[in-house]
């Protein structure tokens, strides 16, 4: 059993609550307002970020090993795709949801995986051996169409997120963004200078990924490593002919990339 | 401090001056109209800090003097990036059930977030805006007063929507004549145009139905044989929705040129002439769009009537201007 103070996460809220009290002149009892916390106080009117929770088990993190084929991922780094064509990425990110390790599903955990980040927290899980890791690339339909402004401030799906990816004109998250440049010469001897922009979304393009393996977690925190080969998302895509989709305007390209998603992941 | 000192936390609905001949204004439960919310939204609406290079605000494409349009064929975003459609008027936006010309967005609160992110509009992020105003005590106080929270996407989207819901326009000369018994409010030409508009020959009111001058239906008006913009079909994926766009309000229409979803018609006369000609005969074309056989004088009368829908009080209302 570990005790996890939540003040780091809630500190900005506490500051704001303090401001409101000062601004309005209202004297309110401060403390913890979350009934799930062990120091919950029903008489508290202002949450000051002091909630403390009993947290069972091990906190699971996922570490992403971003790759471009045989080399480490780098924005602007020129790599060679499935047909020997030069490709470089300028934006690479996707949403991950319904993460399941063994028999434990992290129902409320949503990650925004960016090639700029390598370690993301998932949640607590019982220590021990767990067989199989699976997740969705994208956001399930029940959540996909909610107003992103209604999530808590620091939630992954909030439109406060600096990497927020969402179609405003037909509301729903952009599950995956792949943007960059590619050499489009027939001889594949030119520069990677033609822009490509592939945005995958829509409920029907939600993709489940299942990775087989036995994973042991123990201690306060555990890390499971996942390889992501960003080039594999573009396997068998002819980027000379097809370089843009918002999923609506070129569903064929979106479906082709969706078909590559599962094979782009592996366990470290 | 007793409870009395905390009464400012309670939301007091602020009645907007809605003409009695208008339908009821429905406001979301999480965004009841209050003076504080409208004030916050008003500041946000005119704030260029919402755009990546701080060059444009909501008002750049939605200027009050033009009934909250911009006079351009299509909107211009940061770096003069051209948008894809003509900026719609925000006249009576509180009564609109779905947003954008294709109706893809169901709430004004959700719509308000879109332009901030769109590459061809503000091309920015809410996170970036929040960073810019982090030291702005006035903004912090306004968000707190309006929504009881620090500046965030919720307050931005709700505040903008609250301010836009005050864009109520029902003070035209047509309103004076039709609903307030001012028999001299319309000229003879405007009255002839009114009769054409409401009557069975032109049948304009079938789609542009008073008092809002729209049914909010999606119609193909036969602008093109092949539409570059698929309109409603972009949302539904249905072939029968190709080229169908939401029927726009005609209130303040004389101020919102150019016309059509793509701004392809420069004048009101061009638009009336299109309907008089009956469209190009697209497979999805509305049955209401067919050759009308109107004489030039009748076209003039219709244009005159449309000009009577201008609400000078609305476009000069100081409460809607830049604070």
Image (cartoon, rainbow, N blue to C red):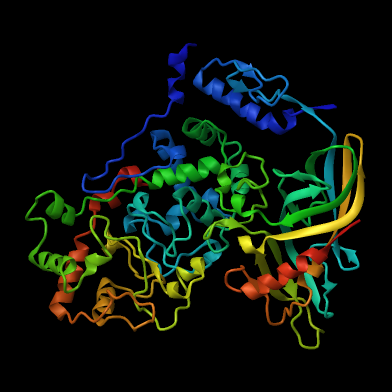
Residue B289 in the figure: left or right of residue B183? right
**What residue lies at 27% left-to-right and 71% top-to-bottom?**
B268
Vertical order, A18 against A212 (above or below): above
Residue A230's spot in the image, x, y percent?
A: 80, 65
On the rendered image, what quadrant is the C terminus of chain B found in? top left
Give the tally of numbered discs: 0
Residue A118's spot in the image, x, y percent?
A: 83, 51
Residue extending farthest bottom: A187
Vertical order, B8 against B198 (above or below): above
Residue A4 in the figure: left or right of residue B286? right
Q: Nearer the viewer, residue A71 or A45?
A: A45
Q: Nearer the viewer, residue A99 or A110?
A: A99
Residue B127's spot in the image, x, y percent?
A: 62, 46
The picture quadrant where one finds residue A154 is top right
Q: Nearer the viewer, residue B76 or B269?
A: B269
Residue A213's spot in the image, x, y percent?
A: 90, 54
The picture quadrant where one finds residue A167 is bottom right
Q: Is residue A54 visible?
A: yes
Residue B308 in the figure: left or right of residue B316? left
Q: Nearer the viewer, residue A187 or A108?
A: A108
The picture quadrant where one finds residue B184 is bottom left
**What residue lies at 34% left-to-right and 63% top-to-bottom?**
B248
Residue extending farthest top: B1
């Amino acid at each position: 059993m570990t005790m996890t103070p939540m003040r780091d996460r809630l500190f900005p809220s506490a500051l704001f609550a303090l401001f409101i009290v000062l601004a309005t002149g209202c004297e309110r009892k401060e403390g913890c307002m979350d009934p799930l916390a062990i120091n919950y106080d029903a008489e508290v009117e202002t949450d000051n970020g002091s909630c403390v929770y009993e947290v069972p088990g091990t906190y699971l993190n996922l570490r992403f090993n971003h790759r471009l084929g045989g080399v480490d991922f780098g924005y602007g780094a020129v790599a060679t795709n499935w047909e020997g064509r030069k490709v470089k990425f300028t934006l690479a990110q996707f949403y991950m949801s319904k993460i399941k390790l063994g028999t434990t599903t992290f129902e409320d955990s949503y990650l925004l995986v960016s090639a700029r980040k390598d370690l993301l927290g998932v949640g607590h899980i019982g220590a021990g051996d767990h067989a199989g890791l699976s997740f969705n690339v994208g956001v399930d339909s029940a959540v996909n169409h909610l107003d992103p402004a209604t999530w808590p401030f620091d939630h992954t799906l909030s439109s406060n997120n600096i990497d927020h990816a969402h179609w405003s004109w037909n509301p729903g998250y952009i599950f995956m963004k792949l943007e960059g440049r590619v050499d489009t010469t027939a001889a594949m001897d030119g520069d990677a200078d033609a822009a490509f922009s592939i945005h995958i979304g829509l409920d029907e393009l939600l993709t489940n990924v299942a990775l087989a393996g036995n994973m042991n977690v123990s201690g306060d925190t555990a890390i499971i490593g996942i390889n992501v080969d960003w080039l594999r998302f573009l396997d068998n895509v002819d980027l000379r002919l097809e370089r843009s989709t918002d999923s609506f305007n070129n569903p064929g390209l979106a479906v082709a990339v969706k078909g590559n998603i599962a094979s782009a992941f592996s366990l470290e | 401090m007793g409870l009395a000192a905390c009464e400012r936390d309670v939301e007091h609905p602020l009645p907007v001056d809605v003409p009695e001949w208008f339908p009821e204004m429905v406001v979301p439960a999480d965004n009841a109209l209050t003076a504080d919310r409208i004030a916050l939204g008003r500041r946000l609406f005119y704030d260029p800090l919402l755009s990546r290079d701080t060059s444009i605000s909501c008002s750049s494409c939605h200027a009050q003097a033009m009934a909250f349009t911009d006079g351009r064929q299509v909107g211009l975003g940061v770096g003069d990036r051209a948008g894809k459609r003509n900026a719609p008027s925000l006249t009576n936006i509180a009564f609109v059930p779905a947003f954008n010309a294709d109706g893809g967005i169901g709430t004004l609160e959700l719509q308000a977030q879109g332009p901030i992110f769109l590459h061809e509009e503000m091309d920015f992020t809410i996170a970036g805006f929040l960073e810019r105003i982090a030291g702005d005590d006035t903004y912090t106080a306004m968000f707190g007063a309006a929504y009881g929270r620090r500046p965030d996407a919720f307050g931005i989207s709700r505040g903008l929507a609250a301010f836009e819901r005050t864009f109520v326009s029902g003070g035209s000369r047509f309103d004076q004549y039709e609903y307030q018994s001012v028999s001299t409010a319309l000229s003879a030409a405007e009255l002839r145009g009114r009769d054409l508009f409401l009557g069975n020959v032109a049948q304009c009111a079938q789609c542009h139905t008073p008092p809002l001058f729209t049914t909010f239906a999606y119609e193909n008006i036969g602008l093109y044989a092949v539409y570059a913009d698929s309109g409603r079909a972009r949302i539904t994926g249905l072939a029968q929705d190709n080229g169908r766009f939401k029927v726009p309000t005609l209130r303040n229409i004389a101020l919102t040129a150019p016309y059509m979803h793509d701004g392809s018609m420069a004048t009101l006369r061009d638009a009336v002439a299109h309907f008089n000609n009956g469209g190009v005969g697209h497979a999805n074309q509305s049955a209401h769009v067919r050759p009308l056989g109107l004489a030039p004088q009748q076209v003039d009368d219709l244009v005159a009537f449309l000009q009577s829908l201008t609400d000078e009080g609305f476009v000069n209302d100081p409460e809607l201007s830049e604070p």
